Image (tube, helix red, strand yellow):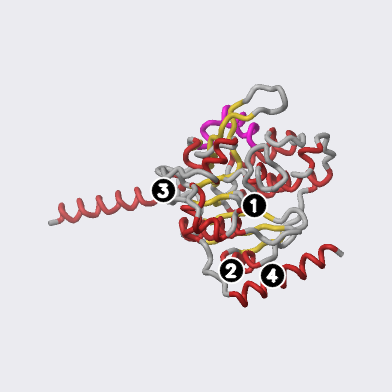
């Protein structure tokens, strides 16, 4: 009898040790950064769907929403209930930077976000994702046990006429609190920042990975970026239907490449076409997943009230 009890106690202690070792390094909380330039348009449906899918798919313990200029509009009114809003200052390095390329200058807000996302993520740990993300399947449990996670994206050219190089996209980052890879990246990023789109944000982490492979886990493209930032990749997301979501955790929309109706080099699709009706009734790769998270239809009176509030906001901004 004593031998049996000793054996059972030994097995129980071994099981406890295994469970303790399997405790997630990365907390199941999510971080989003938005509103780093003045908000002249209402919060978009796509951004609401990002937050709603995050809450449902990931069963997030908490969703932090960092902003400098607070969003507004019907979809923000609904999204605000899903998140913990946190006001943040703009990054002084980016704010003072003199851009040489006017094509990049208009994306200064994205560079502010590059710094803010890492600072906030290192503070408490969790998952950062761009606001033009849609969550598809839960993160594999193994990823929560890593120290720092980035996803591979298609190779990126550092500048005109330069060959493309391996790149790690920063549109989705998983990190334990005070992750060493994140600290190295943030420190070097301040020295490396040159105003380019990818130098500090996607090419630098790849160089750091080469030097410190033990500090980071890299997921294949399929996990976070199955559909690439090309005309064909964006068409696959927004205009065609790819029903294969096996192993896909999230979709990244690369929205800066097609958001404006005036930009047509990557797609004729634009943000104005992404409406509740379109998402609900047109079968595309994005829509068939996103429609699960559409808000309840608003009645006529509610729609009129919302439209009136938005018109007043537009008039106030025009003064």
- Asked whether residue 147 is drawn in magenta, I would say no
Q: Quadrant of the N terminus?
A: bottom left
Distance CA(mark 1)–CA(mark 2) = 24 Å
Residue located farthest toward the left when viewing the structure as drawn: 1
Image point 51% across, 57% down: which residue?
Answer: 53
Location of residue 119 in the rendering, given as x and y in whole percent from the top left corner: 66, 49
- Judging by the rendered image, the residue that carries numbered circle 4 is 307
Image point 50% across, 59% down: which residue?
Answer: 280
Which mark is first along the chain, 1 or 3? 3
Distance CA(mark 4)–CA(mark 2) = 20 Å
Distance CA(mark 3)–CA(mark 2) = 27 Å
Which mark is first along the chain, 3 or 4? 3
**Nearer the viewer's eye, disc 3 or disc 1?**
1
Which mark is first along the chain, 2 or 3? 2
Image point 24% across, 54% down: which residue?
Answer: 9
- Asked whether residue 216 is drawn in magenta, I would say yes
- Judging by the rendered image, the residue that carries numbered circle 1 is 271
**Nearer the viewer's eye, disc 1 or disc 2?**
1
Which mark is first along the chain, 2 or 1? 2
Distance CA(mark 1)–CA(mark 4) = 18 Å
- Judging by the rendered image, the residue that carries numbered circle 3 is 141
Q: Does residue 111 sit above or below 78 in this rendering?
A: above
Under circle 3, the secondary element is helix
Mark 1: few/some/many CA within 10 Å (<14, 14-19, 20+): some
Location of residue 282 in the rendering, given as x and y in whole percent from the top left corner: 50, 53
Which mark is first along the chain, 4 or 1? 1
Distance CA(mark 3)–CA(mark 1) = 34 Å
**Nearer the viewer's eye, disc 4 or disc 3?**
4
- Judging by the rendered image, the residue that carries numbered circle 2 is 81
Q: Quadrant of the C terminus?
A: bottom right
Q: Which residues are magenta?
A: 202-217
């Amino acid at each position: 009898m004593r031998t049996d009890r000793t054996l059972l106690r030994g097995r129980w202690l071994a099981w406890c040790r295994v469970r303790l070792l399997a405790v997630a390094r990365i907390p199941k909380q999510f971080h989003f950064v938005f509103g780093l330039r003045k908000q002249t348009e209402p919060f978009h449906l796509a951004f609401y769907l990002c937050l709603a899918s995050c809450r449902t798919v990931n069963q997030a313990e908490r969703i932090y929403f960092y902003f400098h200029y607070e969003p507004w509009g019907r979809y923000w009114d609904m999204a605000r209930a899903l998140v913990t809003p946190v006001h943040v200052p703009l990054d002084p390095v980016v704010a003072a930077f003199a851009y040489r390329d006017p094509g990049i200058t208009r994306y200064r807000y994205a560079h502010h976000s590059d710094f803010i996302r890492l600072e906030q993520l290192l503070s408490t740990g969790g998952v950062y994702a761009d606001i033009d993300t849609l969550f598809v399947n839960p993160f594999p449990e193994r990823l929560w046990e890593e120290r720092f996670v980035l996803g591979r994206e298609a190779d990126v050219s550092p500048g005109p006429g330069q060959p493309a190089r391996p790149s790690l996209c920063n549109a989705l980052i998983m990190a334990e609190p005070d992750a060493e890879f994140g600290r190295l990246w943030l420190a070097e990023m301040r020295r490396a920042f040159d105003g380019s789109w990818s130098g500090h944000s996607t090419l630098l982490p790849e160089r750091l990975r080469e030097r410190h492979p033990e500090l980071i886990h890299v997921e294949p493209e399929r996990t976070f970026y199955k559909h690439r930032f090309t005309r064909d990749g964006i068409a696959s997301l927004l205009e065609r239907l790819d029903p294969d979501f096996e192993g896909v955790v999230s979709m990244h929309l690369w929205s800066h490449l097609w958001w404006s109706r005036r930009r047509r080099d990557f797609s004729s699709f634009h943000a104005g076409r992404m409406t509740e009706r379109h998402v609900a009734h047109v079968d595309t790769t994005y829509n068939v997943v996103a429609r699960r998270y559409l808000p309840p239809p608003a009645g006529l009176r509610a729609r009129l009230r919302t439209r009136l509030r938005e018109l007043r906001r537009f008039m106030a901004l025009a003064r």
